[in-house]
């Protein structure tokens, strides 16, 4: 099932219900850790994504653990960032379950390809500027023999191009689009860690993209939007998240996340919880 792009509020209602009923949750790094608060405390949580301290699991190992736990009778939730079928290899995992005779269903998620630009004020379509959107993987560079993306065709079109997994290939991607005839002045927005309190947005143009991205130190995960719409900033003030951009330190005594932090996050705050041994009454400081 899809975890959405990062903001815990963008999990679907169906997804939340399934998490609450899970015996086992198999989770990627990008699928927000905060969503695990919805799972029962007794649920087994298996992290299969790369982290600075652990290696990532191979696809075969992930498939095997899904099948193994399901065969043991557990209700298994496979939590994936964004939408599971948008560059998420969700299809491969569903196939592996079907091949093993394990029944499985899919819960779509809010994909970062559309939601991350939107939250940064970039509408991916606009009646006057873009009547097409193409979501492409930038995992393989345009010149790579294994790449099936028609970069020349995209360059010649007026589509909004949304590139996922493209940070490491930014320069090659910009070069391919320029070589194919996209104008140098074409607006580009790069949105790093969208839908999270750490979001950063770089606005530039196609010819300056590579240099500006290096200067800004853009890191993955980021969504790259190329096209006229990337110059727009249509997000009105988000009235549902009045605490966006505010970091709050919340002390709690129990191992489970506290209600206060959950409510602060729902209002957009970056609530950082710290466990204290025992609460003490606040004493005024001089
Ligand atoms: N299934 C996911 C995409 C998986 S590919 C989805 O539907 O969103 C991983 C890529 O998604 C990253 O390299 C990045 O390009 C993008 N991405 C995912 N979450 C993101 C976020 N919060 N901010 C910016 N980009 C994100």
Image (cartoon, rainbow, N blue to C red):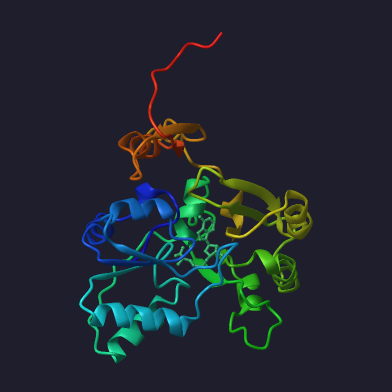
Who is closer to the viewer here, 140 or 101? 101
User: Which residue is the extreme one toward the top?
Assistant: 286
Who is closer to the viewer here, 115 or 105? 105
The image quadrant where one finds the N terminus is bottom left
Please give left or right for residue 32 compared with residue 180 in the image.
left
- Residue at image position (69%, 67%) is 168
Residue 23 is situated, as x and y percent measured from the top left of the image, at 25, 66
Please give left or right for residue 31 compared with residue 229 in the image.
left
Against 189, residue 149 (above or below) is: below
User: Which residue is the extreme one toward the front?
Assistant: 277
- Residue at image position (45%, 53%) is 6
Residue 286 is situated, as x and y percent measured from the top left of the image, at 56, 8
Is residue 122 among what the camera can see? yes
Against 69, residue 31 (above or below) is: above
Is residue 127 among what the camera can see? no
Who is closer to the viewer here, 153 or 264? 264
Please give left or right for residue 228 compared with residue 281 in the image.
right
User: Which residue is the extreme one toward the bottom?
Assistant: 99
């Amino acid at each position: 099932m899809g975890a959405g792009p990062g903001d815990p509020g963008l999990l679907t209602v169906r997804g939340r219900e399934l998490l609450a009923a899970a015996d086992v949750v198999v989770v990627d790094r990008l699928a927000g850790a905060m969503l695990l608060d919805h799972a029962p405390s007794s649920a087994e949580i298996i992290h299969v994504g790369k982290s600075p301290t652990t290696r990532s699991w191979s696809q075969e190992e992930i498939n095997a653990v899904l099948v193994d736990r399901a065969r043991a009778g557990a209700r298994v939730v496979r939590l994936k960032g964004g939408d599971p079928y948008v560059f998420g290899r969700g299809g491969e995992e569903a196939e592996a379950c079907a091949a093993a005779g394990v029944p499985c269903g899919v819960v779509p998620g809010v994909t970062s390809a559309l939601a991350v630009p939107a939250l940064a004020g970039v509408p991916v379509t606009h009646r006057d500027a873009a009547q097409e959107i193409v979501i492409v993987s930038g995992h393989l560079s345009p010149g790579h023999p294994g790449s099936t993306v028609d970069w020349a065709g995209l360059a010649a079109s007026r589509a909004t191009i949304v590139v996922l997994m493209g940070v490491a290939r930014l320069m090659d991607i910009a070069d391919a689009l320029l070589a194919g005839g996209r104008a140098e002045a074409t607006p580009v927005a790069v949105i790093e860690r969208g839908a999270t309190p750490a979001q950063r947005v770089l606005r530039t143009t196609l010819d300056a993209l590579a240099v500006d991205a290096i200067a800004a130190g853009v890191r993955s995960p980021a969504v790259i939007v190329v096209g006229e719409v990337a110059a727009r900033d249509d997000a009105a003030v988000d009235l549902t998240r009045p605490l966006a951009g505010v970091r709050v330190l919340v002390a709690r005594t129990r191992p489970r996340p506290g209600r206060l932090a959950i409510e602060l996050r729902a209002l957009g705050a970056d609530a950082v919880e710290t466990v204290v041994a025992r609460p003490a009454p606040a004493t005024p400081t001089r």
